[in-house]
Amino acid sequence: MSLEKILSERRSAICEKWFDRVIRTYPEETAVFLKSRKNRFANPVGHILFQELEALLNGLIQGVEIESLRSNVDNIVRIRAVQDFTASQAVIFILLLKEVVREELEEEIRQNRIGKALLDWESRVDALTLLAFDVFMLCREKIYDLKANELQKRTVGLLKRAGLLVQDGPETPI
C-alpha cells in the first residue's frame, strides 16, 4: 500500500493528534480553551487552527504544490506572529506533523515498507516549514513597521505640541 493511501486512511487520527500537539505549544490555560474548537465564534483561534491544519495535511497527502498551501500556513502563522512566540516556536507546528506521522506509521516504518516514500514526504513537510518561516518573517516585519510608524507619529505629535517642530511641508519626518 502506498504512503498516500496509508496517510489518507489515517488522516482523521493524524489530524487530531497533530492538533493536540500544536495546542501543547501554548500555555496550559490557553491549550485547554483552544481544545474546545467546536464554536468558531466562541473560539475562533482553535477553530481556525484545526481547520487549517486539516487543510495542510490534506494538501500534503494529495501532493499539491507547497506554494499553494501558503494561505493555510498564513492563517496559522499570522496568529502565532502576534503572540509571544519566537520564529522557531511559531513554525514548529509544522514539524510536529512529522512526529505524529512517525508514531502513527511506526509499524510500517519498522517493516521498512514506506522508507523512501516517507523521506520524500518529510522533505515536503520541511519545505512547508521554510514557507512558514518566510510568512512569519513577513508578518513580524509588518508588525515592526506598524509599531515604528506609530512611534514616529506620536513623537511628531509631541514635538508639535511642545512647539519644537517647524513644519515645512505636509508632514515632516523626524
Image (cartoon, rainbow, N blue to C red):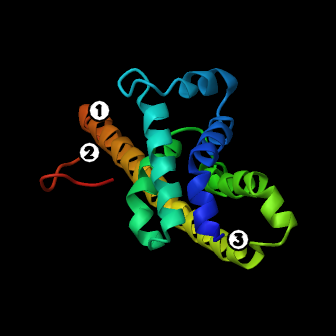
Whether residues under marks 2 and 1 lie with C-beta atoms below 8 angstroms apart, the answer is yes
Q: Which kind of residue does numbered mark 2 sit on?
A: Leu
Which mark is first along the chain, 3 or 2? Answer: 3
> Residue 122: where, in percent of width, then height?
67, 69
Judge by depth and name the residue closer to the eye, 22 or 138. 22
- Helix, strand, or loop for circle 3? helix
Q: Which residue is mark 2?
A: 165
Q: CA distance from mark 2 to mark 1?
A: 8 Å
For label 3, count other residues whose C-alpha is less than 10 Å away and answer few (under 14), some (14-19) or many (20+): some
For label 2, count other residues whose C-alpha is less than 10 Å away and answer few (under 14), some (14-19) or many (20+): some
> Residue 66: where, in percent of width, then height?
48, 70
Q: Which kind of residue does numbered mark 3 sit on?
A: Leu
In the displayed structure, does residue 44 sit left or right of residue 63?
Answer: left
List the single residue furthest toward the right. 110
Q: Which residue is mark 3?
A: 118
The numbered dot on residue 162 is 1
Q: CA distance from mark 2 to mark 3?
A: 63 Å
In the displayed structure, does residue 95 sit left or right of residue 133?
Answer: right
> Residue 141: where, in percent of width, then height?
45, 57
List the single residue furthest toward the front. 1
Q: Is residue 87 in view from this perspective?
A: no
For label 1, count other residues whose C-alpha is less than 10 Å away and answer few (under 14), some (14-19) or many (20+): few
